[in-house]
Image (spheres, rainbow, N blue to C red):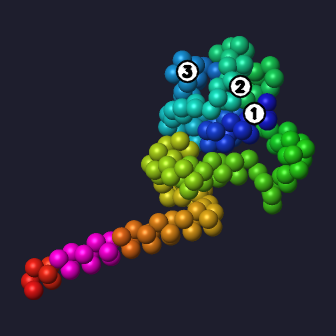
């Protein structure tokens, strides 16, 4: 289950606690929407997460047969699993990824998802905020860690836009000067 949970967290940007408390009854399998009720959401507000990943859809479809009360990210039998740190340590160790307080932790997956949404895919902050379940855009901004190349590209686009604006202003000034002359 953990292998799926890691990939699916990247696909949904859900908090670990929310993902673990999620039950099949919270999933609309026809519309492919996860309805996170306020009682399991950190911010005590209902949240709808569209399921767009084929991998996540396939996983949830397999887990659906466990019944509406089952926890899709729980144990193999669908029972609740409250802590997955030990399982994560094993998975990350097998993958050769450091895990722990000074290395990678579950929460890093949310940072990766937020960074991909905002810095790589140019998702508007208001949309990314809803997807990640943050109450304020300022909190979401803490999660976004743009890479050097992304910053370089943004500044290249800014320079291009400024150059275009300066050229347009110069053309206007030349036209005005020509009319006056």
Residue tagged 3: 28
117 over 60 or under it: above or below: below
Circles 2, 1 touching at the beta carbon (< 8 Å)? yes
Residue 113 spot, x, y in % from top left: 63, 48
Q: Which mark is residue 136?
A: none
- Residue under the image location 38 percent in, 74 percent down: 163
Q: Quadrant of residue 179?
A: bottom left
Label 3 CA crowd tier, 10 Å (few <14, some 14–19, many 20+): few
Q: Which mark is residue 4?
A: 1
Circles 1, 3 touching at the beta carbon (< 8 Å)? no
Query: In this view of the protein, which residue sits in the foreground, 44 or 114?
Result: 114
Label 1 CA crowd tier, 10 Å (few <14, some 14–19, many 20+): some
Where, quadrant-wise, is the N terminus in this rendering? top right
- Residue under the image location 54 percent in, 32 percent down: 50
Q: For the residue labelled by badge 2, is the local secondary structure a helix, a strand or a loop?
A: helix
Residue 21 spot, x, y in % from top left: 67, 31
* Magenta stretch contains residue 170: yes
Task: Answer with left or right where residue 73 lies relative to residue 42.
Answer: right
Q: Quadrant of residue 164?
A: bottom left
Inter-mark Cα distance, 1 to 3:
19 Å
Sequence order check, earlier mark of 2 and 3: 3
174 over 85 or under it: above or below: below
Residue tagged 2: 59
Q: For the residue labelled by badge 1, is the local secondary structure a helix, a strand or a loop?
A: helix
Q: Is residue 131 visible?
A: yes
Q: Is residue 22 visible?
A: no
Where, quadrant-wise, is the C terminus in this rendering? bottom left
* Magenta stretch contains residue 145: no
Residue range (magenta): 165-175
Q: Main secondary structure of the magenta part?
A: helix
């Amino acid at each position: 289950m953990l292998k799926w949970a890691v990939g699916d967290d990247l696909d949904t940007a859900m908090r670990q606690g929310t993902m673990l408390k999620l039950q099949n009854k919270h999933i609309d399998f026809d519309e492919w929407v996860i309805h996170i009720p306020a009682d399991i959401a950190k911010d005590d507000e209902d949240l709808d997460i569209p399921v767009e990943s084929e991998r996540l859809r396939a996983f949830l479809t397999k887990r659906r047969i466990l019944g509406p009360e089952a926890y899709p990210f729980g144990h193999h039998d669908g029972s609740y699993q409250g802590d997955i740190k030990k399982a994560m340590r094993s998975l990350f160790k097998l993958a050769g990824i450091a895990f722990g307080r000074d290395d990678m932790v579950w929460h890093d997956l949310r940072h990766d998802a937020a960074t991909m949404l905002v810095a790589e895919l140019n998702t508007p902050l208001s949309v990314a905020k809803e997807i990640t379940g943050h109450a304020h855009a300022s909190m979401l901004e803490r999660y976004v860690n743009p890479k050097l190349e992304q910053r370089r590209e943004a500044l290249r686009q800014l320079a291009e836009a400024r150059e275009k604006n300066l050229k347009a202003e110069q053309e206007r000034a030349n036209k005005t000067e020509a009319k006056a002359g």
